[in-house]
Image (cartoon, rainbow, N blue to C red):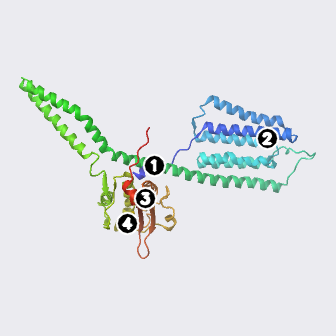
């Protein structure tokens, strides 16, 4: 199930709403108009005001046309969003051409559209926009009108200085876009992994609630079956036709059989059923049972203490979390997996260890992060399997929701293998409740 979830969430499609880009374009247009007004009226510099206003006006017309033609709330295909961001870069390049090119301090605004692309668009489109912005900046280093200034002579900065400005823009685009992309990608992966966690918990919760649904169905069906049974019995007594009486007898017997079956379901699913709550040893055995048919030996050791064994709810989060970690241990182990459990008046602890290669040092600190995984090489079925990815993230998240603290380490040399320790406060283990699904 973990592999299925990973494939569903690992490569999410990226879509940005039209309204988001339009808001950014309107913000850019207002800023550009404000800058033109300040330079023309406040600083009283001479520059081609009308062409600059025409460029901003064209941007505004495009915004109005898009708002009229499309629903602003719709999510755009990445190629369309990239086209609008490229138009932003072209409009900015046009304004900079009219106002000094790279000499204009606002030339660093080339970073804006590329950073937006890094957060919302695929990598190849972000790279394409970055290259387009770099080319526009390079052309502006050679082709541009004079920088607005109050002197008689236009400002002429050295070519080396302009090259440095272009290089700094290029480096800023590359570094900030890469950083933004990495941060956004990590946040996206975490959100997807949490969504997968919720999906797993919901599935486990549905399985746990089947007995409750069965009890409800048995209760609801009990009354109509009783009515059918009574009517069939009375009709059977009063019927003078032997054939009809025989059919009524069969109907009564089958209705009685259904009542007996429903009665058994109700008894098994009642709130006092023996499996609603289970001791720690039973919980461990239920988690271990699906993995006993493999070639790996699983040894379970329960340390008997002077206090009674803890008894907790049959929580699907605990069963899935322990079972997933145990499954990883079986995958890594060469011959044996050990499950040790002990408790006292304050603590409940389960320790799962294997005799495999252990956890790679570079991964030990990252265990529990989503999508940290390396798959087993078919040529080396033991040594190359160093991957603990989304499944362990889900298991750790579910266990921590129940109040557990999960830690990972390797055995001390000369022993080899990984050790996972799960520790609950005893009060939390015995009172933890199955999380309920939100109302929809």
Task: Determine the residue located farthest toward the bottom in the rendered image.
Answer: 414
The answer to whether the residue labelled 4 contacts the one labelled 1, judged by CB atoms less than 8 Å apart, is no
Residue 235 % position (x, y): 12, 25
Q: Residue at x 12, y 29 (%)?
A: 233
Secondary structure under tag 3 reads loop
Q: Which residue is mark 1?
A: 196
Residue 224 % position (x, y): 22, 31
Residue 48 falls in which quadrant of the image?
A: top right
Disc 2 and disc 3: Cα gap in Å?
57 Å
Q: Which residue is mark 3?
A: 404
Secondary structure under tag 2 reads helix
Q: Residue at x 37, y 51 (%)?
A: 316
- Sequence-wise, the earlier of marks 4 and 1 is 1
Residue 222 falls in which quadrant of the image?
A: top left
Q: Residue at x 52, y 52 (%)?
A: 190
User: Along the horizontal axis of the image, is 169 left or right of 368?
Assistant: right
Evaluate whether residue 47 shows in this view: no
| Mark 1 or mark 3, whichever is nearer to me | 3
- Sequence-wise, the earlier of marks 1 and 2 is 2
Residue 392 % position (x, y): 44, 57
- Sequence-wise, the earlier of marks 3 and 4 is 4
Disc 1 and disc 2: Cα gap in Å?
47 Å
Q: Which residue is mark 4?
A: 333
| Mark 2 or mark 4, whichever is nearer to me | 2
Disc 2 and disc 4: Cα gap in Å?
67 Å
């Amino acid at each position: 199930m973990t592999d299925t979830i990973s494939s569903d969430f690992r490569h999410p499609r990226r879509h940005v709403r039209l309204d988001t880009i339009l808001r950014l374009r309107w913000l850019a247009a207002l800023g550009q108009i404000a800058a033109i007004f300040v330079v023309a009226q406040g600083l009283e510099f001479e520059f081609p005001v009308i062409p600059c206003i025409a460029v901003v006006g064209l941007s505004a017309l495009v915004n109005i046309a898009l708002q009229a033609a499309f629903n602003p709330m719709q999510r755009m295909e990445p190629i369309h969003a990239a086209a609008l961001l490229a138009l932003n870069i072209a409009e900015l390049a046009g304004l900079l051409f009219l106002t000094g090119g790279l000499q204009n301090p606002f030339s660093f605004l080339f970073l804006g559209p590329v950073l937006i692309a890094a957060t919302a668009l695929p990598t190849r489109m972000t790279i394409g926009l970055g290259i387009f912005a770099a080319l526009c900046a390079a052309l502006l280093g050679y082709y541009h009108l004079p920088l607005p200034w109050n002197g008689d002579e236009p400002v002429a900065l050295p070519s080396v200085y302009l090259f440095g400005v272009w290089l700094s823009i290029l480096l800023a685009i590359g570094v900030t876009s890469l950083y933004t992309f990495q941060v956004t990608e990590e946040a996206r992966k975490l959100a997807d992994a949490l969504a997968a966690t919720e999906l797993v918990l919901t599935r486990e919760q549905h399985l746990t609630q089947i007995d409750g649904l069965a009890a409800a169905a048995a209760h609801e069906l009990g009354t109509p079956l009783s009515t059918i049974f009574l009517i069939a019995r009375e009709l059977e007594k009063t019927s003078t036709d032997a054939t009809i009486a025989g059919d009524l007898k069969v109907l009564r017997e089958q209705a009685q059989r259904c009542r007996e079956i429903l009665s058994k379901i109700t008894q098994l699913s009642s709130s006092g059923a023996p499996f609603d709550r289970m001791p720690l040893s039973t919980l461990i055995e239920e988690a271990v049972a699906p993995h006993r048919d493999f070639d790996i030996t699983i040894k379970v050791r329960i340390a008997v203490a002077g206090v009674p064994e803890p008894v907790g709810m049959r929580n699907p989060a605990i069963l899935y979390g322990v079972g997933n970690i145990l499954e990883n241990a079986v995958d890594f182990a060469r011959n044996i997996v050990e499950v040790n459990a002990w408790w006292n008046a304050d603590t409940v602890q389960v320790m799962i260890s294997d005799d495999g290669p252990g956890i790679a040092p570079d991964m030990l600190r990252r265990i529990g992060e989503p999508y940290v995984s390396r798959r087993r090489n078919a040529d080396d079925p033991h040594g190359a399997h160093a991957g603990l990815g989304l499944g362990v993230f889900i298991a750790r998240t579910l266990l921590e929701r129940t109040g557990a603290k999960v830690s990972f380490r390797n055995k001390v040399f000369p022993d080899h293998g990984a050790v996972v320790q799960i520790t609950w406060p005893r009060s939390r283990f015995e009172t933890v409740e199955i999380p309920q699904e939100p109302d929809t």
